[in-house]
Image (tube, rainbow, N blue to C red):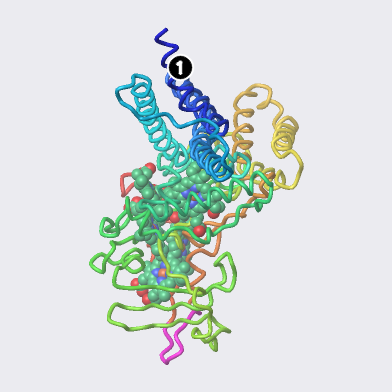
Amino acid sequence: MRIKLWLDAITGLFARNWITLLGASVTTVSALFIIGYFAVGIVVELPPYAGIVGYMVLPGAFVTGLLIIPVGAWWDRRRRLKAQREGLPEPLPYPRLDLNDSRTRRAFAVVGFLTIANLFILSTVTYRGVVYSDSVEFCGLICHTVMEPQYTAFLDSPHARVRCAECHIGPGAPWFVRSKLDGARQVFAVALDTYPTPVPSPVENLRPARDTCEQCHWPSKFTGDRIRVIEKFSPDEDNTPLTTVLSMHIGGGNADHPGIHSWHINPNKTTEYYATDYEREDIVYVRVTNDDGEVTEYFARGHEDLDPAVLPPDALREMDCIDCHNRPTHVFRLPGEAMDRAMALNRIDADVPYIKARGVETLEAAAEVEDGRAYIAEELRAFYQENYPELYAEETERVEAAIAEVQNIYGHNVFPRMNVTWGTYPNHIGHTTAEGCFRCHTNTHRTLDEPREAIRQDCTICHSVLAWDEHEPAILQQLGL
Ligand code: HEC
Ligand code: HEC
Ligand code: HEC
Ligand code: HEC
Ligand code: HEC
C-alpha cells in the first residue's frame, strides 16, 4: 500500500508528458548502470576499454536524459498555452501545491531525493571521468594503433611513471579545456580513420616546457658536470666492447655554473630560431636577446641576406627544453644504438658470436619486409645453424634468447601500421645519430658584423671526451667505475 503511494507520487511527477517520462527513464536506467559499473569496478579490475562505456557513454546518456526532462516541461507548457488560447480543456491540470496534502509532500520528497542523487552521481562520474581521460591507459591504449609507438617507447623510459597528461597538458584550466577539445577531435580522426601516419613530430602546439618539464626539473636545480659512460660493441666475432666516457658540462640554470643548461636555460636570455622545414632540422637563423636588450643574430651560410622582419610572426620559435630534449620519453633508437643498449644491459648475451653485426644487419633489413619479426628469427637462426652448428645445437636456448631480444628491439622501434621505422623520430640531444646540437653549432652559423662570431662546434664546450670508443679505458678505473 505504502509502496503504491510512493509510486503514485513518482508517476504523478513524470506521467504528465511522455517526453519528460522518456528523459527520466533514460537517466534512471543509465544511473543504475553507472552504479553497477562502479560496483563491478570495486570487485574486479575492468579493462581500460570499459572506461569508455563507464565514463563516457553512460554519463552521456545520463546527462542527455536530464536535458530531455526540461524539454518535456517546455513542450508541456506550450501544449497548455495552446489549449488556453483555443479555449480547450487543459490536458492534465497542475496539482495544487499544498504541503498539508501527503501526496504533495511525497512528491517533494521524491524530487529532493532524486536531485541529490543526481548531483552525487554527476559529480562522482565527472571527477572519475576526468581522472580516467587523463590516465596513461586512456591516452596510450584507447587509440591503440595510433599511440602504440609512443606508448611502447614511454613504458621503457625514465618517465614511465609520469602520466602523459603531465607533459602534454600540464596544470591549469585553459590547457585542460584545450586538451579535451583537441582530444575530441582526435577521437573523430580515429573513428573516421583520417589520422596521419606517422603521427607528425614536432607536436605543433605542445605546451611550453616551462609549464610542464619545469614542474619537476626547475632550472636552478641543475649544477655541475655529469659523467656519461656509453657502451658499444664492435661488429667483430667477439663483439669487442668499446667504451666512450664523456663529462657532460650540464651546468646550472644560471651563469654561476657554466655549461649547456647555464647557457641555454638561463632566465636572462631568450634564444629564438627560424627553421625552413616543419621538422625544425634546417635552422637558418638564430637570434639571442639578453635581458638588457642586447641582440645577437646568427645566419647560416648562404642565408646571410635573410631579413627576419619579413618572416611571418609565428615563424620564429623560442627555444626551450624540447628543442634539445625532444625525446625525453618516446625514445626510438637506430639498430646500432638499440643493439648496444640491449647488450650493455645484458638483455642480449654478448658472447654469442657476431650477434652485434648480424643483429644490426637483420634489423635494418627487417623494416623492409612484410613480417619483420619472422624474418629476424629465420635469418638469425639460419646464420647460426649454418656457421656455428655446434654452438647452436649445444646452447640453443642462449642463441634463441638473443634472437628473441633482437625481435623485441624491432617491436619497440618499427611500427609498420603507423609507418614508423628506423629514424622516423630523430633525437636532438647529441649529434651522432641525428644533427641535434649541430643544427646550430656548425661553426658556420655566424653574425654579420666583423669579427664574425660563430655558434661554435669546439669539442669541449659541451663535454670533455675522456675516452672515445676504447676497450677498457683507464679512465673508468681512475673514476672507480
Ligand atoms: C616526460 C614527458 C612526456 C610524457 C610523460 C609523455 N610525452 Fe608524449 N611527447 C613528449 C615530447 C617532449 C614530445 C615531442 C614534442 C616535440 O618534438 O614537439 C612528445 C610527443 C608525443 C607524440 C607525437 C609524436 C612524437 O613522438 O613526437 C605523441 C603521439 C605522444 N607524445 C603521445 C604520448 C602518450 C600517449 C603518452 C603517455 C603514454 C605520452 N606522450 C607521455 C613528452 C612526453
Ligand atoms: C612529473 C615529474 C616530471 C615531469 C613533468 C618531467 N620529468 Fe623528467 N624526470 C622525472 C624524474 C623523476 C626523472 C628521473 C628518472 C630516473 O632517474 O630514472 C626524470 C628524468 C629526466 C631526464 C634524465 C633522463 C636520464 O636519462 O637520466 C631528463 C633529460 C628529463 N627528465 C627531461 C624532462 C623533460 C624534457 C620534460 C618535459 C617534456 C620532463 N623531464 C618532464 C620527472 C619528471
Ligand atoms: C641546449 C640544449 C638543452 C636545453 C635547452 C635543455 N637541456 Fe637538459 N640537458 C642537455 C644535455 C646535452 C644534457 C646531458 C645529456 C646527457 O648527459 O646525455 C642535459 C641533461 C638534462 C637532465 C639530466 C641532468 C642530470 O643531472 O642527470 C635533465 C633532467 C634535463 N637536462 C632537463 C632539462 C629541462 C627541464 C630543460 C628545460 C628547462 C632542459 N633540460 C633544457 C641539453 C639541454
Ligand atoms: C637553435 C640553435 C641552437 C641549438 C639547436 C643548440 N644551440 Fe647551443 N648555442 C646556440 C647559440 C646561439 C649559442 C651562443 C653562441 C656561442 O656563444 O657560441 C649557444 C651556446 C651554447 C653553449 C655555450 C657555448 C660557450 O661558448 O660557452 C653551450 C654549452 C651549448 N650551446 C650547448 C648546446 C647543446 C649541448 C646543444 C644540443 C643538445 C645545443 N647547444 C643546441 C644555439 C643553439
Ligand atoms: C653543442 C654541444 C656539443 C658540441 C660542440 C660537441 N658535442 Fe659531442 N655530444 C654532445 C652531446 C649533448 C652528446 C651526448 C648525447 C647523448 O646524450 O647521447 C655528445 C656525444 C658525443 C659523443 C658520444 C656519442 C656516442 O654515442 O658515442 C662523442 C664521441 C662526441 N660527442 C664527440 C664530439 C666531438 C669530437 C666534438 C667536436 C667536433 C663534439 N662532440 C662536439 C654535444 C656536443
What amino acid type is highlighted by mark number 1? Answer: Leu
Question: In the visual, does 61 lie left or right of 101?
Answer: right
Query: Does the beta carbon of the residue at mark 1 sit less than 8 Å from ligand 1?
Result: no
Position of residue 93 measured from the top left corner of the image (x, y, whole percent): 48, 31
Please state the horizontal and vertical placement of residue 9, each as a whole percent of the image: 43, 21
Depth check, front residue: 372 or 315:
315
Corner quadrant of residue 382: top right
Depth check, front residue: 347 or 410: 410
Magenta stretch: give its range: 444-453
- On the image, numbered disc 1 is attached to which residue? 7
- Can the viewer see residue 465 in this picture? no
| Magenta span: chief secondary structure | loop
Residue 31 shows in this picture: yes
- Which residue extends farthest bottom? 450
Q: Count residues near mark 1 (Cα–Cα under 10 Å), then give few for <14, some for 14-19, many for 20+.
A: some
Q: Position of residue 389 (x, y in %)?
A: 71, 27
* Image coordinates for residue 73, horizontal then vertical, percent: 50, 38
Taking the view exactly as shown, the residue that stands out farthest to the left is 256
Instruction: Say which residue appears at 53% left-offset and 61% top-offset.
Output: 204
